[in-house]
Image (cartoon, rainbow, N blue to C red):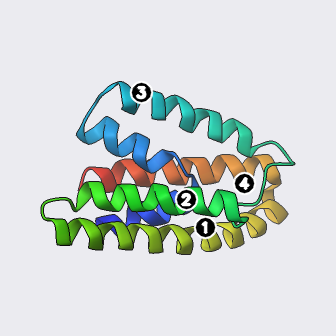
Amino acid sequence: MVALLLGAIAGLRTLTPPAVLLRVRRPSRAANVLAVMALAEYAADLYPKAPARTAPGPLLARIVSGAFCGWFVSRSTPARAVAGAGLGALGAVAGAYAGLSFRERATKRVGPVAAAIGEDVIALATAFLVARL
């Protein structure tokens, strides 16, 4: 379940789940670098010409991020690691499409900047809650 949830969050923001997961469970320089990269992703997301999360490149990045998170939380045995990676990848695809739908509706109601910041807050808060499970 944690693998699937982290994958879904990766569908919203590619770098937030691995950054939070590593900061919570294994603080390191890599976690710090990912955290800075996640902040840069938040800023880039505000740019009107940012590619759609469901375009091939961004979607693949989200799938890899979700798979990594799923693997990380499920790596107690090789079979669980593979299953966790698969669940994380599936969650990322679902999260990307659900997040796109949410974002489009939120943009119509509150505007693009407020919708983006709201999505950032949801992704970050949810990632911290799930990473602690």
Do callouts 1 and 2 mark residues in contact (Cβ within 8 Å)? yes
SS category of the residue bearing label 1: helix
Q: Which residue is mark 4?
A: 115
In front: mark 3 or mark 4? 3
CA distance for labels 1 and 4: 15 Å
How busy is the neighbourhood of tag 4: few (under 14 within 10 Å), some, or many (20 plus)?
Answer: many
Q: Mark 1 or mark 4, which has the lower sequence index?
A: 1
Q: Mark 2 or mark 4, which has the lower sequence index?
A: 2
SS category of the residue bearing label 4: helix
Q: Mark 1 or mark 2, which has the lower sequence index?
A: 2
How busy is the neighbourhood of tag 3: few (under 14 within 10 Å), some, or many (20 plus)?
Answer: some
In front: mark 1 or mark 2? 2
Q: Which residue is mark 1?
A: 96
Q: Which residue is mark 3?
A: 32
The amino acid type, in three-letter code, at marker 1 is Ala
In front: mark 1 or mark 4? 1
